[in-house]
Amino acid sequence: MLELHLHLDGSLRPESVWDIADSQNINTGCSSLEEIRDNMICPPHCPDLTDYLRRFDIPILVFQKESNIERFSYELVEDLAKEGLEYAEIRFAPSHSVKEGLSQEAVVEAVISGINRGMKMYPQIKIQLILCCMRGDNMYEANMKTINVAKTYYGKGVAALDLAGAEALFPTDSFRELFDYARSLDMPYTIHAGEAAGPESVISALSFGAHRIGHGINSIKDESLIERIIKDNITLEVCIQSNIDTKAFPENEVHPIKKLYDMGVHVTLNTDNRTVSNTTLAHEIELAKSIGFTDDDINKMWEYAKMARFD
Ligand SMILES: [Zn+2]
């Protein structure tokens, strides 16, 4: 098993967050591990995307010191190895961890140190990192910095770039200059698109030269886009439970992944945020089977994921 779409800050162990907040006097507003857990995990009937995104508030608080970042990175590798993964691409936004003075380079080095320790302990798994540029106000300089940092550590733990954050508020097309720059440095990238926004977002991401799309499920609404995705061998990193939680597709409809697969799109199974969505790859496989995927189909999706790896 392998996964291509997994956010580090959405996959922290609540026990470790509690331990760190308690021992370092970090004010999370929670007075017990149970409360931390309730804040970090989205409820089964998550009201909306805003509620989902609120689940990242506490992780960001404890993600500002090198030793904490190293520990969380190691622990995620351990969790993935124990689930039986052979390969994973873990993504995070270095610009989210500079609130207490760390540089983006220091953040990336702390993550690399944690994953290297994890791979030493669990040599059966290989990890690569994806650095996320963020949608948002006044992010231009921080995002340019993230691209430069990704270039510095490319081949030394970092494999690619991403664009994450509120897609409906900050359209993909407005980030063209950023990806022109990334391309000029020969940096590969995937882009979150077609999750909270429509097919036009995926069309923009493809026009930037992306060969992989985070989610991309709203491509289903545009037949000519689907044809292009198939013709150009574009891979969609689909995260079923996360899409259920954020209501990325209508509640009364079946998730479009099976329809996309049957049309010939290279779809893959991923968790997105293991803690926030309270999921594992085993759970994503169960969800896929519940909407009609056979074991052979699931094996084919692992093959699609292997072909799209950034390493
Ligand atoms: Zn994501």
Image (tube, rainbow, N blue to C red):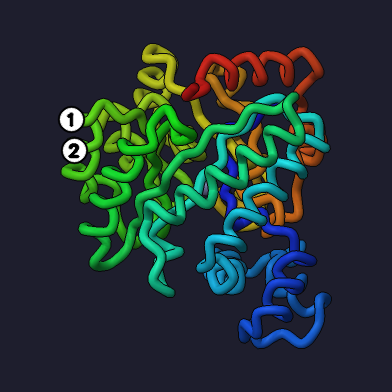
Label 1 lies in ligand 1 vicinity (Cβ under 8 Å):
no
x and y, in percent, of residue 35 in the image: 77, 79
x and y, in percent, of residue 125 in the image: 70, 28
How crowded pointer 2 is (Cα within 10 Å; few <14, some 14-19, many 20+) is rated as: some
Q: Would you identify the image quadrant in which residue 58 lies? A: bottom right
Label 2 lies in ligand 1 vicinity (Cβ under 8 Å):
no
User: Do residues under tags 2 and 1 come within 8 Å of each other at their CB atoms?
Assistant: yes
Q: Is residue 122 left or right of residue 225?
A: right
Residue drawn at x 71%, y 25% is 86
Label 1, secondary structure: give it: helix
| Residue nearer the viewer, 91 or 177 | 91
| Residue matched to label 1 | 184
Residue drawn at x 66%, y 54% is 11
- Asked if 162 appears above or below 120 in the picture, the reply is below
Label 2, secondary structure: give it: helix
Q: Is residue 135 left or right of residue 15?
A: left
- Asked if 253 appears above or below 106 in the picture, the reply is above
| Residue nearer the viewer, 174 or 101 | 101
- Asked if 117 appears above or below 291 in the picture, the reply is below
| Residue nearer the viewer, 171 or 147 | 147
x and y, in percent, of residue 68 in the image: 61, 63
How crowded pointer 1 is (Cα within 10 Å; few <14, some 14-19, many 20+) is rated as: few
**Label 2 to label 1: alpha-carbon separation:** 5 Å
Amino acid type at circle 2 is Tyr
Amino acid type at circle 1 is Ser
x and y, in percent, of residue 75 in the image: 72, 50
Q: Quadrant of the N terminus?
A: top right
Taking the image as drawn, is residue 129 in sight? yes
For the image, the number of numbered tags is: 2
| Residue matched to label 2 | 181
